[in-house]
Image (cartoon, helix red, strand yellow):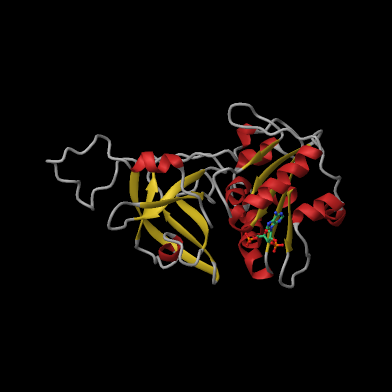
Amino acid sequence: MTTLSFPFLRAMEKPKRSINRMETPPPLAQLPENLSAERVLEVQHYTNRLFGFTITRPASFRFRAGEFVMIGLRTAERPLMRAYSIASAPSAEALEFYSIIVPDGPLTSRLCQIKPGDEVLMARKATGTLVLDALTPATRLFLVSTGTGFAPFASILREPETYAKFKQVIVTHTCRDAAELRYSADVVNALPDDPLVGEAAAFHVMRYATCTRGSCQRRGRITDLMQSGKAFADMGIAPLSPAHDRVMICGSLGFNHNMQALLMRAGFTEGSNAAPGEFLVEKAFVG
Ligand code: A2P
């Protein structure tokens, strides 16, 4: 995933107190208190620019489905951290992430080389806007993603509360080609066997996958397919309406912007943790 560094990252990485000139800087092995050192458990490469990995979970680490956390590696100077959406269920023992490899990207070009047993750094706190609590009640939940923007939706699809709150969950994933759609297919196909959500997910989840450059079953940008009504006709469902739908958006900046505009034209209002609403956009992430 292409990720943004945050203003708070700089603050986070500052030493707790200013270092007096006479003091020796902390040794490299010493991590800032807000980071923990975790171990890589599994790595799976999907294409030459997409991979997933799981790491150990600290016992004290809590998160809500859809949130992200800073993930990174040590460097000679300081930890190099980027925001990653957590793909696992909040109850999972290990933490799963899905990443793009940015050529010459300082973190992902190194992170893509990790192997089981290697160290990965993780912030102790998760945060984010794509949470169920930030949506008002409705019947259907649309999770609309491009690229690695599907990752937070893997977590939401694996969370039992999703099915307690919504009767139907429609997850869309748009990528450049069919190979890039595999991760979302694997996640959704595994849901019926999930002991926590299997029964609900088997009947209530619909996946709509499209690609825009290679050959695949369905072609087109999801924004165009929703605008024309083709996506809803293909799925045999009613078009989007704030009367019965809630939407989460996660993908590239351009996609997030276009999808947000489409929803606002349809009369949806944006929600937040402080004021729940009818749609949410992941602001911390460019996928
Ligand atoms: P396209 O191939 O037409 O650019 P990327 O891998 O570059 O992040 O793109 C992932 C998917 O998101 C691609 O299928 C891409 O389509 C699509 N996409 C990119 N920008 C937008 C946008 N502004 N609106 C809708 N879809 C977009």
Farthest front residue in view: 21
Farthest top residue in view: 275
92 or 196: nearer the viewer? 92
Where residue 114 sits: x, y (%)? 40, 65
Q: Say if residue 142 shows up in the picture.
A: no
Residue at the (82%, 33%) spot, across then down: 243
179 left or right, relative to 215: left
Rendered-image quadrant of the C terminus: bottom right
180 or 237: nearer the viewer? 180
Name the image quarter holding residue 248. top right
For ligand 1, give the image quadrant: bottom right
191 or 146: nearer the viewer? 146
Rendered-image quadrant of the N terminus: bottom right
Where residue 186 sits: x, y (%)? 62, 62
Where residue 164 sits: x, y (%)? 67, 37
Residue at the (62%, 53%) spot, across then down: 252
Residue at the (35%, 63%) spot, across then down: 117
Where residue 217 sits: x, y (%)? 77, 68
209 or 54: nearer the viewer? 209
Q: Say if residue 117 shows up in the picture.
A: yes
Circle count: 0
Residue at the (68%, 35%) spot, across then down: 165
